[in-house]
Amino acid sequence: MTARVTFAPASPVGLAGVWLLLAAGYFLTALVNGQFVLSSSQDIGLWSPLWLPTGLAVAAVLRLGARVWPGILIGALVHDYFILELPLALALALDTANVLEALVAAALFRRLSGTTDPLSGSRSVLLFALAVFIAVAGLSATLGVGALALSGVIAWQNAGLMWWIWSLGNTAGALVLTPLLLSGYDAGARSWNRHRLLESALIILLALGVTHTAFGGWLNTPASGLPLGFLALPFLVWAAFRTGRCGTTVLIALLTLIALWNTVQGAGPFVRETGLESVWLLQGYILVVALTGLLLGAVVDERERARRSLQQTLDGLEARIQAGTRELRQANSTLEREIGERTRAERISRGRGRVLEMLATGMPLPDILHTLMEETEAARPDIICSILLLDTDGRHLRHGAAPSLPQHYCEAVDGLEIGPRVGSCGAACYTGERVIVEDIMTHPYWEGLRELAAGAGLRACWSEPVKSAAGEVLGAFGIYQREVASPHPDDLELLSGAAHLAGIAIERKQVEERLYDLANFDKLTGLPNRSAFSSALNHALQHARRHQARVAIFFLDLDDFKLINDTLGHDVGDRLLQDVAQRLRENVRSDDQLARLGGDEFTVLLSDADDFQRVGELAERLLEVLALPYRLAGQDTAVSASIGISLFPDDAEDAATLLKNADIAMYRSKRQGGHSVQFFTPEMNAEAHDRLQLENELRKALERDEFRLYFQPQWDLDGSTVVGLEALLRWEHPTQGLVGPDRFMATAEHSGLIVPIGNRVLQAACEQGMAWLEQGLLPQRIAVNISSRQFQRQDMTEVISRTLRETGFEAGRLELELTETVLMDNGEDTVTMLRALKTMGVHLAIDDFGTGYSSLAYLKRFPIDRLKIDRSFVMDLTRDSDDAAIVAATIALGHNLNRTVIAEGVETQAQLDFLRQHGCDLVQGYLLSRPLPAEAITELLRAQRAEAPDADALA
């Protein structure tokens, strides 16, 4: 705790008085200290092992503030000038250093510890010693020794030795005297009585006796008896534990003075032939005794403060308990004054405390309610207690606890529907009000239960509804009597208090159950979540290891679930997930663990998978069941699933790897078209590792700018004029050379890196197009492919607009190629985005036309400029009549819709002739030109311009 600093009086007279008192104290302390000097035998005169005035000065600054420094200076100056007869200049220099020493030590200690009490803790003791030593060594010792050497009082070769003696002596003086002077402000920390005073006196006397025995020469101790000087340390421990900081600091001072006095008188273990050695030994002894005692005192004081804090906490708790007891007493002041009622109230309080303790330690609710019944019955031995809980439907009673009621009675009332004629508890739950029945045999509430109550020997029942903090009825607390009886006010108070406590317990447990459900179950489907599944998996693996069994994990993912969400809405998607969860529940065994990991990912844990045939049959059955149509948004919708399976111990030894391998197998199933089952194989793991490595290399490639653009010319039907360019991506790998997009594009799409890569392609294509435009070489436009990830982003139009704005490239010379699948995946949103792009002036083309699925109605609405026939149809059109028919029909469709048609992948003259014959507008392919770097395209365009002087017309 930080001690408060008390500053010197504000009035000039009061402040001057403080200065004079402090000067007198400093002067007298210096006089006393002068009696404890030893000859150094090092040509530096007499020297004291410690300087007590330092302790007084530091204590004054810590307690009274920095404004007392003139008192320190006056006292020191009077002593040095008049007693030591030092020259005035030298005395003033030495005493100024002493003043600075005290000010800096106090300020540094306050800064380091945040307190002005050196004994506030063991840390404060150490910081105090450090602050004093730094101030002494850095100021007083350095300036003082320098002044003495400059004035010729000591030789320069002895300056270092004297600096050490000065530093340690002043530090020792502060450690001995400052805590002693400040310990008086801790008078209230301990209670002092006659016994404690006598014990303190005994400690001090014994310690003084032992110390004087060691130092007074009674043991005739030579140098080998040095350890005897520390015989008093046990008494320091005793003093610290029994007398606190005050007694400890007094004992430290007394032990120090005895050691000093006897050594100065030539007795004790520290007497040596050279006074310097005696000085060192005494300083070491004083520092050890002071630090040991102060640390012990601080530690014990910390413990005492902790004890007092704990006691205050306990007192506070006791006060709250007593306050509760007083509230009970106020209900009936007459009975409260009677001894029996007071005992009863205390019994109730202890019983409730026991119940709350059980609640705080997480005991089961039945045990808590059972204890509450016992404690309530113990408070009034002639009653029988019962608690009935409302079922989750809020209409039926369930047995909670009734330790003194017959078993057959409890079983009979369990499950009764609440109502006005279902006993006292049923009526209390029904009305939410207290129900008092003085005679069960005559009251209408017990009409249908009188025989049951008579068989249990019950004649009266008072019931209180158990409610939550929000007022919701949770059950009913009943007090039964075996005789006709009316409740007294204290009985009603007992009933009300017990019902309230029961409500706290029940509501707390309900909250715990809800929190458990939230932490372990998926809110949408009610299935266990990832956390619960991991726990079950680890448990199953432990069991399998002990019994050498096999465990299987199914990792199940719905195919094209995103399409359901995007087209029918997330509410419909959630309904689908609930239906999937229900179908899974109905088709797995009760001991198989189901879970939803998130999104559309589900897992099944088979703890007994030794039968491979059963594992495979279950997976196939789940595929069949999940593939049955779902009734969604008023229509039947078919959804398939992909399942990956991994086995323990065949595929992995730990839970994380087992789950990862099942995930890998599931993705293999998806890559093969979905609606299938794949068992994990080691090759899959290698593929996954390769994909991860490729993804990391792609990230580095982005950072290192390793991607390059190639351009493939688009020609008119004569094959003589370049009318457009398609930007194609290549990866200049540092070790593998130039890598085509077929090697990395799928991984880029899966990882999401396609977005920054695609944006960079768009930026580079526009920059290169601008460069050709400035040279007058650019044909009609440059085509750039847009991935599905890019197109689905809300900021795609902003990215394109910003790129055009930053590069200066004309929107009308940019053509974006999108696949049919990309366009159809987003419905109306696609139309909106395409129209926004057309408003900007950008040209749009459908890439790989015919390979996806298109709605002709949507195609008519899309503001598309160009259809691009996929190379798969062009490749065999001269040999396959179906491909020829598709290409011819696509050309005709495009022209009828006023769209330009371009065919890609033209590699033979026969293919080119066919396309000319059917009126295809543009072509591109290896027959005419491979993709080329920008430099080669530049040469091609320059050659074309040279051959056709009017080539500007193409731009």
Image (cartoon, rainbow, N blue to C red):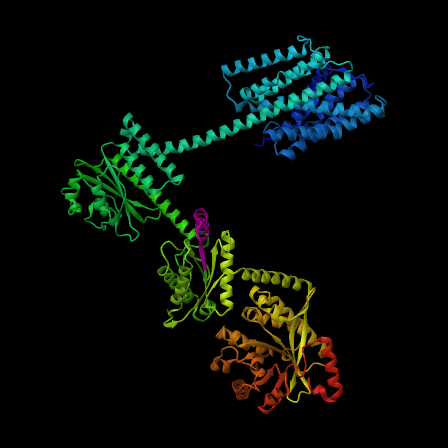
Nearer to the camera, 655 or 340? 655
Marks counted in the figure total 0
In the displayed structure image, the side of residue 136 where residue 504 appears, left or right: left
Decide if residue 839 is on the left or right side of residue 558. Answer: right
Query: Is residue 551 found inside the magenta-colored segment of the image?
Result: yes
In the rendered image, which quarter contains the C terminus? bottom right
**Residue at the location (27% across, 38% down)?**
495
Residue 669, percent from left and from top: 49, 66
Residue 695, position in %: x, y? 60, 62
Q: x, y (%) of residue 429? A: 26, 48
Magenta stretch mostly in which secondary structure? helix
684, above or below 290, in the image: below
Magenta part of the chain = 533-554
* Residue 19 visible in the displayed image: no
| In this view, 458 is above or below 594 | above
Describe residue 274's horizontal placement relative to residue 428 as left or right. Answer: right
Q: Position of residue 844 (x, y in %)?
A: 58, 79
Is residue 27 depicted above or below 744 in this figure?
A: above
The answer to whether any part of residue 362 appears in the image is yes
The picture quadrant where one finds residue 726 is: bottom right
The N terminus, quarter of image: top right
Residue shown at 48% from the left, 82% from the top = 856
Quadrant of res 179:
top right
The quarter holding residue 9 reads: top right
The outermost residue toward the bottom is 917
Residue 650 highlighted magenta (yes or no): no
333 is higher (above) or lower (below) than 738: above
